[in-house]
Image (cartoon, rainbow, N blue to C red):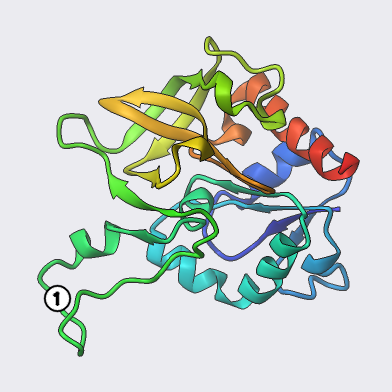
Amino acid sequence: MIAILDYGMGNLFSIYNGLKRVCNSAVLVSGVSGSGLGLREAEGVVVPGVGAFDDGIRKLKPFVEALLEVVDSGVPVLGICIGMQVLFEESEERREERREERSEEGKEGGEAGLGLIPGRVVRLPASVRVPHIGWNNLHLRPESRSELLDGISDADYFYFVHSYYCVPRDEETVVATVEYGVQLAAVVKKENIYGVQFHPEKSSKKGLRVLSNFVKMCTLG
């Protein structure tokens, strides 16, 4: 079973329909028990998402304990867009949106990320149009190959929609980049944790190939 976390961050049915095209066992999980199909029973977990970092973290909280157990057990986890960003330690998004506001402690508010991948999330540079919307091609890093991108080349385009991007502390976690003013991390990997900044479910045949690769990694692991 491939569990898709239904935590209220949008884009849910697009990724569900995309996975159903390559997998017969994709299941939406709206609670830790998931109507008898618990998150802890999954062979793979997908964390989708469209929206803001803080909202994503807050809405994920009911899943965090089970999700961390899944990660510790070695089950593959794939974060998509905001679902990738929440895997990191922190985001500057909250600080920029509420720069004039202060918490009771005198510090700017903001939710901590899951911290599964060391690094932070920062805003796209002022030199480019924000958000980054549209098709862009990946640049694969040969030294950081991953089964997630089997059958994918530098010439392949994927669909992006985002205003912030991830900056891992360890460059070895970056599997592929995309150029948009600067070289951005487009695909990351740390052990059994994977993240893609693009939307595979909106990226035609190559996007479905990425989803299919993830399913194979889960079911053959």
Residue 119, position as x, y percentages in the image: 40, 52
Crowd band around label 1 with a 10 angstrom C-alpha radius: few (<14), some (14–19), many (20+):
few
Q: Residue furthest bottom?
A: 104
Residue sitting at 35 percent across and 23 percent down?
Answer: 179
Q: Residue furthest top?
A: 155
**Outermost residue toward the left?**
100
> Can you say whether 55 is above or below 211 in the image?
below
For label 1, the residue is: 101
Is residue 218 toward the left or the right of residue 125 in the image? Answer: right
Q: Which sits in the foreground, 69 or 45?
A: 69
Residue 37 sits in quarter: bottom right
* Position of residue 101 measured from the top left corner of the image (x, y, whole percent): 14, 75
Amino acid carrying label 1: it is: Glu
Q: Secondary structure at mark 1?
A: loop
* Residue depicted at 55% across the width and 64% down the height: 8
Q: Quadrant of the C terminus?
A: top right
Residue 37 vertical placement versus 47 (above, below): below
Horizontal placement of 100 versus 54: left or right? left
Q: In the image, is residue 143 above or below residue 9?
A: above
Residue located at (53% from left, 13% from top): 154
Where does residue 182 sit, x and y in percent of width and height? 28, 27
Q: Position of residue 174 (x, y in %)?
A: 50, 35
* Count of marks placed on residues: 1
Judge from the rendering whether residue 48 lies leftward or rightward of residue 185; answer left or right. Answer: right
Give the camera-side residue of 148 and 136.
Answer: 148
Left or right: 63 with respect to 82?
right
The residue positioned 71% from the left and 22% from the top of the image is: 150
